[in-house]
Image: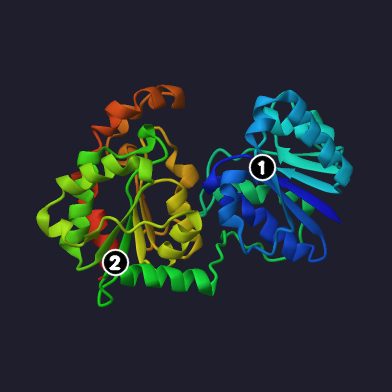
Amino acid sequence: MKILVIQQKMIGDVLVSSIICNNLRAAYPDAQIDYLVYASTTPVLEGNTSIDNIILFEEKHRKSKKELLKLGFQLRNEKYDLLIDAYSKLESWILVFLSNAKRKISYKKTGRNFLYTDNVPFAPFPKTNLGLAIERRLSLLEPLDLKIKIDPIPKLFVSEKENQEALALLEKNNVRKDRKTIMISLLGSEKLKTYPLEFMSKVVDFVADNADVNILFNYFPKQLEDAKTVFNTCKPSTQEKIYFDLLGGDLRSFIALMNQCDAIIGNDGGAINMAKALEKPSFIIFSPWIEKKIWATFEDGIHHLSVHLKDYRSDLFEQKSEKMLKKEALSLYQEFKPEFFKDKIESFIEKNIS
């Protein structure tokens, strides 16, 4: 059997959707399982033996109709028996149509159900603490009636060499071995997903005040100035616990560093999803326009907690669409005071760090 899974999206989405591949491998151990993703997301798939081939969706496929069609016919030549489209947007619809796969599964959406042999309802609300991001992906397996125990947890694989390199980096930066280490997801992928910097410095202060820990900042080199702003606004006693310049050189080295940490706190995004896949406790601060019910995965009130402005100021969300909330995100962020959830951070640290 030849299977193709499609997820043309960002790191967190690709990692979460890899659970489709993992469960397919358990059900069909001898199948060829291919995964179509963006080139920038492949580091989260390294070492995953559930995936035989990674097919890259590149910028040229987005910019050129000729290249997109060429990719579609490449997929057709593979003669897939099963295709699961977890992306389900125009680009993947074209690829699905051209693939000519025998069986095609995706979400039920008006106007394009004819493309698929199986159309799965797009669940509006989560049924468990897995969160909609996980539940929706797993729903794409339901038409197959797999005779296995479904595993809902995404996996990251870190080699011994990578672990040793991360330990060497910690030692080089004189990170104290006698205390635990917390990673701060300092900045989101964009400003609309980034907790205000002056507020984030208070969050870091909360962490430092409540535990004798090492604190690492997760940020990209291009975000250096914003990271400095947070650092400079923190209390001197907090700054003493921060290893500001300790960064991995690439995504794989970040994963290895995260594997040496004891928890992650901060903005929702790829770093949080990677930490969860490494079985690290997480505390997420959601952007006002992001739906918590989707990405608050594995929420149990102990090891995985999250906060959203709507939890405290539901009046600000009445009769507002996602589009309206996104437009107002920056002003709404200003209403999301860190004092609202100070006690939750303290509880999280007490249960997972102290």
Q: Nearer the viewer, residue 1 or 104?
A: 1
Classify mark 1: residues with Cα within 10 Å, few (<14), some (14-19) or many (20+): many
Characterize the local packing of mark 2: few (<14), some (14-19) or many (20 or more) Cα atoms within 10 angstroms: few
Along the polypeptide, which appears first: circle 1 or circle 2? Answer: 1
For image coordinates 20% across by 62% down, the residue present is 241
Residue 152 against residue 180 in the figure, above or below: above
Which quadrant is the N terminus positioned in?
A: bottom right
**Is 200 rendered above or below residue 29?**
above
Identity of the residue furthest to the bottom in this view: 178
Q: Nearer the viewer, residue 213 or 136?
A: 213
The residue at 86%/39% (across/down) is 76
Q: Position of residue 310 (x, y in %)?
A: 33, 37
Give how far across and how far down residue 57 sits, in percent: 67, 39
| Residue 344, position as x, y percentages in the image | 26, 55
Numbered label attached to residue 86: 1
Q: Where does residue 343 sit, x and y in percent of width and height?
A: 21, 54
**Mark 1 is on which residue type?**
Ala
Figure quadrant of residue 188: top left
Q: Quadrant of residue 349?
A: bottom left
User: Extreme left residue here?
Assistant: 236
Tag shown at residue 173: 2
> Total marks drawn?
2
**Disc 1 or disc 2, which is closer to the eye?**
2
Q: Secondary structure at mark 1?
A: loop
Q: CA distance from mark 1 to mark 2?
A: 41 Å
Depth order, front residue of 177/315 = 177
Residue 243's place in the image compared with 40, above or below, is below
Let me know if residue 67 appears in the view: yes
